[in-house]
Amino acid sequence: MAFDPTRGIQDFLVFGEYGDVNPSITDSSTFTFKDPQTMNEIFDHEIEGCFLYSRHWNPINRHLSEALAAMEGSEMALVTASGMGAISSTTLQICRAGDEIVASHTIYGGTYAFFKNFLPKLGITVKFVDMTNLDEVKAAITENTKMLYGESVSNPLLEVANIPELSRIAKAHNLTLVIDNTFSPMIISPIQWGADVVIHSMTKYINGTSDCVAGCVCSSSEFIHALTDINAGASMLLGPVLDSYRAASILKNLHSLHIRMQKHSENALFLAEHLQKLGVTVFYPGLTSHPQHDLMNQLKNEGFGYSGMLAIDAKDDETADQLMKLMQEEKVGYLAVSLGYFKTLFSSPSHSTSSEIPKEEQEEIGLSGGLVRMSVGLDHNIQLSFDRIHKCLKNIGLV
Ligand code: PLP
């Protein structure tokens, strides 16, 4: 399948108010109307080019949303104040009390906590399954299931979701397939493989500078209109609105995403291959040893590699801590959660971004306390970074 996630962004030329090469920032929460009649009308239905109030839509958020829709090949998109804002609004738009969700058991810890601890308060229940096992997915579906939820490349174990097959299952049971594509923007285009809704934490690769929190939902016009409906839309009524200054800066960064993804992936593959040669256990979908390597090859768009995320097994919690401390001292990068930054970031998911998942469940899904997740940066001299990691590994006796 040849889909070019850069094409729509390349065509994206929006002039600012005075012909500026960047669209003007909307520095207003509210908008005037020449006549009260039009204001009355917009409460009934959206009017093209007409804005009411910034929690609903504003021009710069609309521009960023259009660029994201072009990237994912969706009819529309909506930007939100965080990835969690996108996930919670989407979920609450689709599900109501009594409904069930079937979700992958390897997902971001915040999403897991929202599903496990928060949704039951609203009468929505979630069954966690091994999403790489399609029979398990099918077996979990009941007549109350409304949504299938997974991550294209999962956090933190880097499992790859079989989106075409999940889409077939979703269609057969009339479910909405929601895919979080935070780890693989441009690399995988889930809508092209049959997903109904794609979510990003734009805090990560899409923005790429670790200076703000933001999210987005890409889907059909019908779904985005439902989310923003003045009377019943989850995003309109819960209000996770992205600040327009941030929307403007993210839009500028989006234009270099394709180059950044290539470099993140190139560096991650280099480290993954070299670390594996040293005898380290490495989880990376670009390695032939990865269980979903062939699937990843089938799903990925040409030219962006296998993502900048990899994980290594440092055996136990203590060794993982020592390794991360040393890597920071050796200037490999920062000991910090999050990902998609130009510098390498590393953390121990078991004690941070996945700590919401109880220890027994972590063990069940193969998430060991010794796992170190790395978001590989844009280092020009990746050999130097590898040499530094090698030195750290030797120092703690892991190689
Ligand atoms: N999805 C994934 C895969 C994530 O890693 C994260 C955050 O780490 C989120 C969603 C939540 O995004 P945010 O922190 O922007 O709310």
Image: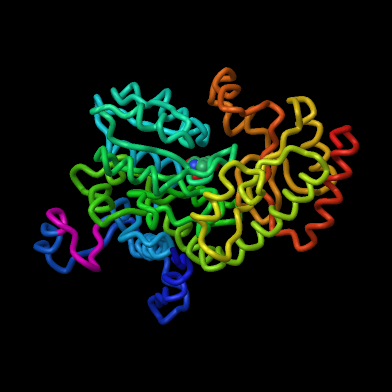
Snapshot quadrant of residue 262 = bottom right
- Residue 352, how many percent across, how many down? 62, 31
Could you tell me which residue is drawn at 36 percent across and 49 percent down? Answer: 195
Front residue of 178 and 26: 178
Image coordinates for residue 312, horizontal then vertical, percent: 71, 38
Give the quarter of the image for residue 137.
top left
Q: Residue furthest bottom?
A: 19
Task: State the quadrant of the C terminus.
Answer: top right
Was residue 35 drawn as part of the magenta stretch in this picture?
no
Q: Residue 327's spot in the image, x, y percent?
A: 80, 42
Residue 77 on image: x %, y %: 35, 56
Report whether 361 appears left or right of 76. Answer: right
**Along the line of sight, the residue nearer the viewer: 270 or 224:** 270
Q: Is residue 351 above or below residue 18?
A: above
Question: Which of the image's four quarters has the N terminus?
Answer: bottom left
**Residue displayed at 21% across by 67% down:** 48
Magenta portion: prevailing SS class: loop
Tell me which segment is drawn in magenta: 42-52
Q: Tell whether 101 sits left or right of 182.
A: left
* Horizontal relation, residue 322 to residue 65: left or right: right
